[in-house]
Image (cartoon, helix red, strand yellow):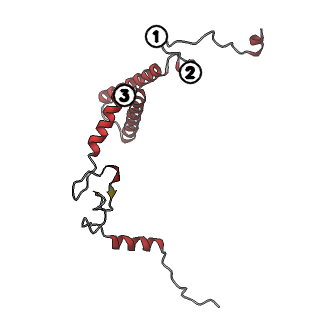
Amino acid sequence: MEHDKTGCQPPPEGPILCINNCGFFGSAANMNMCSKCYKDLILKQQQAKLAASSIENIINGPLNCNEKEAAVAGATNVQADMAEVKAISVPFSNASSSAVSGDLGAKEGTNRCSTCNKRVGLMGFKCRCGNLFCGSHRYTDKHDCPFDYRTAGRDAIAKANLLVKAEKLDKI
């Protein structure tokens, strides 16, 4: 009786399962789907729109400049959304984390001194010339550093100290 007077509906009796029967709970905001199924549905819709627009472009021929810019902007937005959805929907597991960390290690390489090729690990020293050195070769005179510290210092001082000019006319 109270619900009829206020116009509110009572909450559902129990939790709603996903309409795709995946076993997760759905929500009314996601059309009674779980978040994963809803993201997949949105992704399929975006791909269908992109395919339809590309087919129209092929059939209708070349577009004028404004329509081309809008089509390119729409395509990049859809591609960015797809990449974001893929990044979100990738499940996290120990196998995938070891593969990702292995890829990062292969790209970065081992930390070795540029002069003596000694392994430095976390204790390596980065020089302004861009190389990595061990404790004994970290100083500029030990590894014949090509970086010009004198001009870098002069530039830093010139930026820090503004040019001061005296007034041309004396105030009375």
Comparing marks 2 and 1, which lies closer to the viewer?
A: 1
Say which amino acid is labelled 1: Asn
Comparing marks 2 and 3, which lies closer to the viewer?
A: 3
Residue depicted at x 34% and y 36% = 63
Q: Is residue 165 above or below residue 6?
A: below
Q: Mark 2 touching mark 3, by CB under 8 A?
A: no
Q: Is residue 93 above or below residue 8?
A: below
Q: Mark 2 touching mark 1, by CB under 8 A?
A: no
Which numbered marker is on residue 29? 2
Q: Which residue is mark 1?
A: 21
Q: Residues within 10 Å of mark 1 (few under 14, many from 20)?
A: few
Q: Residues within 10 Å of mark 3 (few under 14, many from 20)?
A: few
Residue 160 lies left or right of residue 140; in this view the side is: right
Of callouts 2 and 3, the N-terminal one:
2
Under tag 1, what secondary structure?
Answer: loop
| Front-most of residues 95 and 166 | 95
Q: In the rendered image, is residue 53 in sight? A: no
